[in-house]
Image (cartoon, rainbow, N blue to C red):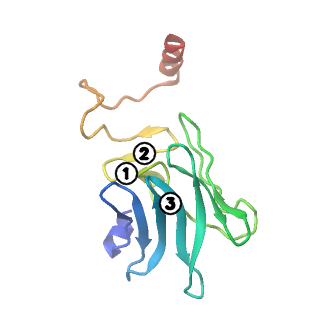
Amino acid sequence: MENRRRCGDSPLQDEAGHILGEYDCTGKMVQETVYLGDWPMATVRLNSAGTAVAYYVWPDHLGSPKQVTNPATNKVVWRWETNPFGPTPNPYEDPQGTGNTFVYNLRMPGQYWDKEISRSSNGFREYDPYMGWYIQSDPIGLSGGLILVHMWTATQRAILIRWVC
């Protein structure tokens, strides 16, 4: 998000952390998101003629966007399938295979995808979806103890899973 910060193109958030919109360096809307409570319901974008067009956002039970559909065609234009733990794949920005990509940068609630660094940011720390964890320690220390970040090895995960299950 460094390049966007230099020219003023960063996501706009409300006091609850909802990402309301993205704007280019001139202040022109790139996209805005409409919420119902904490859940994203629609994204509004300008088409090539400069007219605002709304797309439906379909979130999961956590408020993470899972797909975006075009209400005019009822076709899915963006889809994101996540894993409950560990690595999360990139979204399908052209699930119909039409050659038209649809970029939507919302991820988990409050997280904004930054393609330049391949991580999501919530304003306090960055989440690495390929590793499945935050790369900085908890800024308010809720996890407790002296070690606030621990990189689990595959062996440690296997031991923990056997111990918990």
Marks 3/1: CA–CA distance = 12 Å
Per the rendering, the mark at residue 127 is 2
**Quadrant, the C terminus:** top right
Residue 116's place in the image compared with 88, above or below, is below
Marks 1/2: CA–CA distance = 8 Å
The reply to whether callout 1 and callout 2 are in contact (CB within 8 Å) is: yes
Q: Which quarter of the figure has residue 19?
A: bottom left
Q: Residue at x 38, y 79 (%)?
A: 25
Neighbor class of circle 2 (other Cα within 10 Å; few <14, some 14-19, many 20+) is many
* Secondary structure of the residue carrying numbered label 2: strand
Per the rendering, the mark at residue 105 is 3
Residue 84's place in the image compared with 24, above or below, is above
Residue 84 horizontal/vertical position (percent): 56, 35
* Secondary structure of the residue carrying numbered label 3: loop
Residue pointed to by mark 1:
122
Residue 17 horizontal side relative to residue 77, left or right: left
Mark 3: amino acid: Asn
Task: Select label 1 or label 2 by which is in front.
Answer: 1
* Secondary structure of the residue carrying numbered label 1: loop
Neighbor class of circle 1 (other Cα within 10 Å; few <14, some 14-19, many 20+) is some
Mark 2: amino acid: Tyr
